[in-house]
Amino acid sequence: MAGVFNGFAVIVALVALGWVLARSYVLGADARLVLNRLVFFVATPALLFDSLARTTLDQVFTGVFVVSAGSAMLIAAAYVLIARVWLKRPAADLVVGALSAGYVNSANLGIPIALYVLGDLGFVMPLLLFQVVVLQPIAIAVLERAARAGGGADTVDGGSSHESGGGALGSIIQAVRNPIVLAALAGVVVAALPWTPPDKLLEPVHLVGQISVPGALLVFGMSLYGVKVLEAGASPRREIALASILKLIAHPLLAYGIGGGLMGMQGHELLTVVVAAALPTAQNVLVVATRYGHGVLLARDSAVLTTLGALPVLLLISALLA
């Protein structure tokens, strides 16, 4: 238990430092963008490849993956059902809400928590691959269909989704070409080989990968500075409340039920699946929502609220299960 709380203390300290750096502008106005690109394109791929290249496939695809994938799909489906009956929202908004409830931040927060709190990256890679290769493409297909029905959706740079990505297939290919996913896939390939790269060969990759965790936490702290959520008359508060409750309460409870009740998990393995489910909404949801012009405030505010609420939830889970 002391180790768990120490791990969270490290995370909170670095997030707080990131907030202070953003507030003081000591690193300049573009610091968050530059550091985020370093973490996303270089450090995190290096960390995932280095970790996976040293493992075997049976250590990656375990019951943790089954519980994480199953609980995420069920929570997303629950949001669609409840919001469709209660709020009567269009399909595109339902998709964004479903992602907000079930798509967890497995990279920016998942990796630090996996390393500092759980002591390994066992759940991160398969969960990340499931979300990017399975869950996100399903959402993109629905949003692409809604964009075609509405005459095309605007993207961040002003072009249509068809012009910038070649439709749903182009969007899916773009998602799979994500450097984090490519590094994870490359790591899986190496893990499948009857050969482990020598430490001397992996050492430069290992050193670069060490930037990932502190860098991601600093970026996350910077992103919290100056954010206004739940603006009256703008933010869809009922949808945000529903997504946040499902994400922070229902999702970890469901993972606990599937892992402990159906699959007989105990101890550290059960703690891992529940912690994975309690991670906050991923920032990828906001990227997808912005691309297709649906549920942008829902995605943004759900990510902020679940991120702020995740820490006490994770501490409670650790106190009960660690």
Image (cartoon, grey):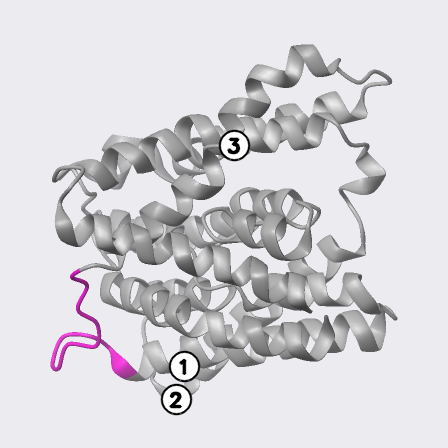
Q: In the visual, does 283 lie left or right of 49?
A: left
Q: For residue 304: magenta?
A: no
How far from the left and from the top, in percent, is residue 162? Answer: 28, 36
Q: In the visual, does 255 lie left or right of 109?
A: right
Q: In the visual, does 317 lie left or right of 177?
A: right
Which residue, given by chain and number where applicable, does mark 1 sit on? 242
The stretch in magenta equals 226-237
How far from the left and from the top, in percent, is residue 28? Answer: 13, 37
- Look at label 3 and name its amino acid: Gln
- Name the residue: 56% across, 31% down: 47
Query: Is tag 1's residue or tag 2's residue first in the polypeptide sequence?
Result: 2
Which residue, given by chain and number where applicable, does mark 2 sit on? 86
Which residue, given by chain and number where applicable, does mark 3 sit on? 210
- Name the residue: 46% across, 83% down: 82
The residue nearer to you, when weighing 270 against 160, is 270
Label 1 secondary element: helix
